Image (spheres, rainbow, N blue to C red):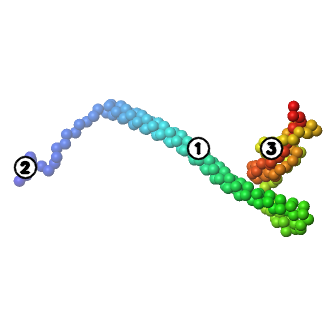
Amino acid sequence: MSNDNESDEIPVNVVTENKDDEPKKESESLETVQENFSELLDAEKQKTSECEEKLKHILADFQNLTRKTQSDIQNGVNAKVDEFLLDFLKIYDDFIRARDVFSENKINTEGLDSILKNMDSLLKKYNVTAIDALGEIFDPNHHEAISVITDPDLDDNTITKEIRKGYISQNRVIRTTLVEISKKDDN
């Protein structure tokens, strides 16, 4: 009962290509793929270059921010330390004045001398040094002139008297020295 028209096979039409066209199409296809890869590679190289430039700028900005932050922190700490030192120096000056008054009145100053010695040690420990001014030429960065005397024997702006001691800490002037300076002539 088999019928030739009722076969389980599916008919397939086979188309054969000319063998001369195959290498041509293959090489054209390979060239197209290479061009596409080359274009993609160039695009990725460009993106990578742009990302590297952005990264360099971001890194430079970060380094600048880090430096500025460290500088701001250091300046803030220095300002507080300087403020404390100024308050401490006022008390130190009071102790020196008290010792001088007691000495003038021939009162025992051993206790004050001991306290001042400890204060001097503390100042030295934290690199706070007095500004030596007497006999020096006036420097507005270190001195503040509050009076002028006429003395023809001295050069102009020679410091003749220290009225209040000045101090330097960490290469910064904490307090200027109040001084009297000389002037050669009134003319």
The amino acid type, in three-letter code, at marker 2 is Asn
Q: Nearer the viewer, mark 1 or mark 2?
A: 1
Q: CA distance from mark 3 to mark 1?
A: 46 Å
Q: Residue furthest left?
A: 1
Q: CA distance from mark 1 to mark 2?
A: 86 Å
Q: Give above or below for 172 relative to 42.
A: below
Q: Helix, strand, or loop for circle 2?
A: loop
Task: Name the residue: 48% across, 37% down.
Answer: 46
> Split into 4 quadrants, where in the image is the C terminus?
top right
Give the numbered dot on residue 3. Answer: 2
In the rendered structure, are the residues bearing label 3 and label 1 in contact, judged by CB atoms less than 8 Å apart? no
Q: Give above or below for 116 relative to 184.
A: below
Q: Label 3 belongs to which residue?
A: 145
Q: Position of residue 82 (x, y in %)?
A: 71, 54
Q: Label 1 belongs to which residue?
A: 60
Q: Position of residue 103 (x, y in %)?
A: 89, 63
Q: Give above or below for 53 relative to 3.
A: above
Q: Is residue 121 visible?
A: no
Displayed quadrant of residue 97: bottom right
Q: Is 145 or 134 nearer to us in this picture? A: 145
Q: Is residue 7 visible?
A: yes
Give the numbered dot on residue 107. Answer: none
Horizontal side, residue 102 vs residue 26: left or right: right
Q: Is 142 or 57 nearer to us in this picture? A: 142
The amino acid type, in three-letter code, at marker 1 is Ala
Q: Residue furthest right?
A: 153
Mark 2 surroundings within 10 Å by alpha-carbon count, few (fewer than 14), some (14 through 19), many (20 or more): few
Q: Position of residue 133 (x, y in %)?
A: 85, 47
